[in-house]
Image (cartoon, rainbow, N blue to C red):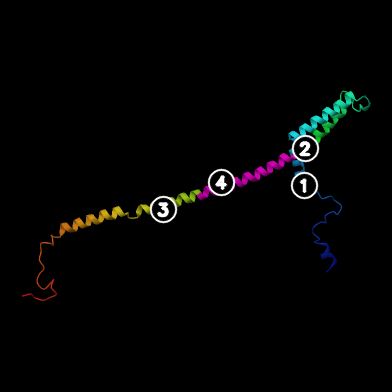
Amino acid sequence: MSDSTSRGRLDTPRTSRFAPRVDVEAVGRFSENIARFLGTGRYLAFQTIFVIVWIALNLFAVGLEWDPYPFILLNLAFSTQAAYAAPLILLAQNRQENRDRVSLDEDRRRAEQTKADTEYLARELAALRLAIGEVVTRDYLRRELEELRDMLEALQPDRTDEKPKSGKGDGGKKSS
């Protein structure tokens, strides 16, 4: 095996061995988890407790005053948190929007298929109704046969009054 075939194709550039490989889906899942956590009551409770402890320590613990009254460091922490949370929340919303779009496309495709199936079944049902309309029903056939019998009886004289002619009802023998 030659050296050029073992390296790969010459018309495609090599990927850098030192470039970091970032899984976009992993970043998206991470941002969704953070956005989901930021919207919970647990997060609000933790943040409220943290702010109360921060303010209490800075107001009442004289030796531990690392952030005096205007609480500039606390404001900086909240600003930093907001600066990171906003893009993560937007990323999570974009991912949800993409999932909703895929779901909507699937629903639309399924609705079109259902509509096509319904139209096909409606055409088949209409064809069956037409076919059944052409089929002779029992009542119709009975009525037609009764009319034919009545017509035949009207055309033929009553046969009960006639006697059979000699030679015909006795097998061809003459009786004496």
The boundaries of the magenta stretch are: 88-117
The label shown at residue 3 is none
Which residue does the image show at 88% across and 27% down from the upper left? 57
Describe residue 101's horizontal placement relative to residue 77 as left or right.
left
Q: Nearer the viewer, mark 2 or mark 1?
A: 1
Q: Are marks 2 and 1 in contact (CB under 8 Å)?
A: no
Binning the other alpha carbons within 10 Å of mark 4 as few (below 14), some (14 to 19) or many (20 upward) gives few
Residue 87 picture location, percent across and down: 77, 37
Of mark 2 and mark 1, the one earlier in the sequence is 1
Q: Which residue is mark 2?
A: 87
Left of 37 or right of it: where is 117?
Answer: left
Say whether marks 3 and 4 touch (CB < 8 Å). Answer: no
Look at the numbered discs 1 and 3 and tell me whether their residues touch, using CB distance below 8 Å.
no
- State the mark number for residue 128: 3
> Where in the figure is residue 172, as x and y percent of width and height?
12, 75
- Identify the secondary structure beneath mark 1: helix
The residue where tag 4 is placed is 111
Give the CA distance from mark 3 to mark 4. Answer: 25 Å
Q: How far apart, in angstroms, are the residues tagged by discs 4 and 2?
A: 35 Å
Q: Which mark is residue 26?
A: 1
Relative vertical location of residue 59 with respect to residue 105 in this rendering, above or below: above
* 3D distance between C-alphas at marks 2 and 1: 15 Å
Sooner in the amino-acid sequence: mark 1 or mark 3: 1
Q: Along the polypeptide, which appears first: circle 3 or circle 4? A: 4
Dot 3: what SS?
Answer: helix
Q: Badges 4 and 2: C-beta atoms under 8 Å apart?
A: no
Residue plotted at (74% across, 33% down): 41
In the rendered image, residue 81, in percent from the top left (x then y), is placed at 81, 34
Packing grade of label 1 (10 A; few <14, some 14-19, many >=20) is: few
Q: Relative to 11, does residue 52 appear above or below in the rendering?
A: above
Q: Which quadrant would residue 45 be assigned to in this image? A: top right
Q: Residue at x 29, y 53 (%)?
A: 140
